[in-house]
Image (cartoon, grey):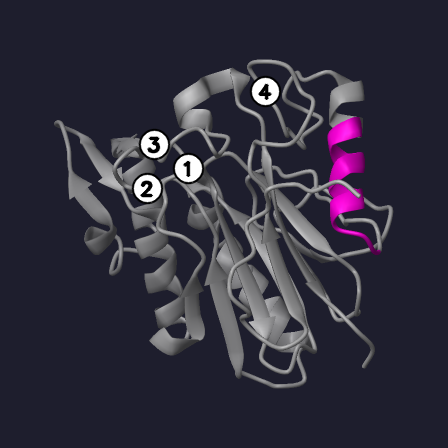
Amino acid sequence: MVSLPLWAPAAVLDGIEIRVSTREGGVSPSPYDSLNLADHVGDKAESVDENRRRLAEALPGHAVCWLNQVHGVSAVEAAPGVVPDADAHWTAARNLPLAVLTADCLPVVLMARDASCVGIAHAGWRGLAAGVVENGLSTLLEEARSGEDRVAVIAPHIGACCYEVDQPVIEALQVRYADGLEDACRPSRPHHVHLDLGQLVMAILLKAGFRADQIGVVSDSCTSCSGKGFHSFRRDGDGAGRMLHRIVVSGSG
C-alpha cells in the first residue's frame, strides 16, 4: 500500500471525505517533482500515469472523476470515465470521487448537509468573473434533498501575499462583484492590487445565503510561499505541476 502525504481536513460532515494532495510522493522529475497529477503541463505521460496509480492505491475505491478545466463556468454531473470540458462537477451518487486540479487557483467544495449531493469547483479569477461558484451552487440546490441547508469548504490556494493582479483583472471581476471586491483587495503598486481569492469567495458565498458557520477553510497556507509543499504556477511558471482536491460521499444510502 502506497502512503502519500495527503491533507485530510477535520471531518466536515458525516460520510463525506475530503483529501488534498501535495507535491510529495510521486515520480515526476524536476520541475514537476514529484507528485504531479496533471497530464497537460509537459510532464512525462508515464510519470503522470504512475502518480495517478499511486494516488488510486493510497485512496482505494472507485476511479476519480476528472475534468478538462478551461477556466469557465460550466458545472456538469460527474460520470465515470468521462472527462468533460468544465470547471465544476457534482454528484448525488455514493462512492464516486470528484476532483479538480490546481496550482494556485481556489477549489471550493459545496455539499448538501444531508450528503445527498456534493460538488467541487475550480475557481481562478476568470472562473470567478464568469460565475463558476454561483453556477455550481445553483446546480447543488437543484439536486440536493436538503434544500438550502448546505456547507462549503475553501481548500488551499494562493494567498493575497503572492497574488498581485492588474487593472484588467479587477475590471473583469467588478462587473459581477462590485460590492464585495474592495474588501478582497490589498494595496500594491499603481494599477495593481493583491487579490485575496479566499476573501472574495467567502463574500460570494455569504451573498448567496450561506452563514459564516456553514463555510470552512482547509488551510490558511499560501500555495505559492508556504514552502515547497504545494505546486504553484505563480512561483514556478510553466514548470508547475498540479495537485488534487478530492471529495467523495462514502457508504450506501
User: Real-space Cα distance between discs 2 and 3?
Assistant: 8 Å
Q: Main secondary structure of the magenta part?
A: helix
Instruction: Write the residue at 46% across / 26% down.
Output: 233
User: Real-space Cα distance between discs 1 and 2?
Assistant: 7 Å
Look at the numbered discs 2 and 3 and tell me whether their residues touch, using CB distance below 8 Å. yes
Look at the numbered discs 4 and 3 and tell me whether their residues touch, using CB distance below 8 Å. no
User: Real-space Cα distance between discs 1 and 3?
Assistant: 6 Å
Label 4 crowding class (10 Å Cα cut-off): few <14, some 14-19, many 20+? many
Instruction: Write the residue at 55% across / 60% down.
Output: 109
Using residue 166 as the reference point, say whether residue 223 is left or right of it.
right
Q: What element carries label 3?
A: loop
Q: Would residue 238 be visible to someone looking at this image?
A: yes
The tag earlier along the polypeptide, 4 or 1, is 4
The tag earlier along the polypeptide, 4 or 3, is 4
> What residue is disc 2 on?
159
- The foreground one among 102 and 200 is 102
Label 3 crowding class (10 Å Cα cut-off): few <14, some 14-19, many 20+? some
> What residue is disc 1 on?
223
Residue 32: image tag: 4
Label 2 crowding class (10 Å Cα cut-off): few <14, some 14-19, many 20+? many
In the image, residue 215 sits, relative to residue 84, either above or below, namely: below
- Kindly indicate the quadrant of the structure image that contains residue 210: bottom left
Q: What stretch is highlighted in magenta?
A: 50-61
> What residue is disc 3 on?
225
Using residue 7 as the reference point, say whether residue 249 is left or right of it.
right
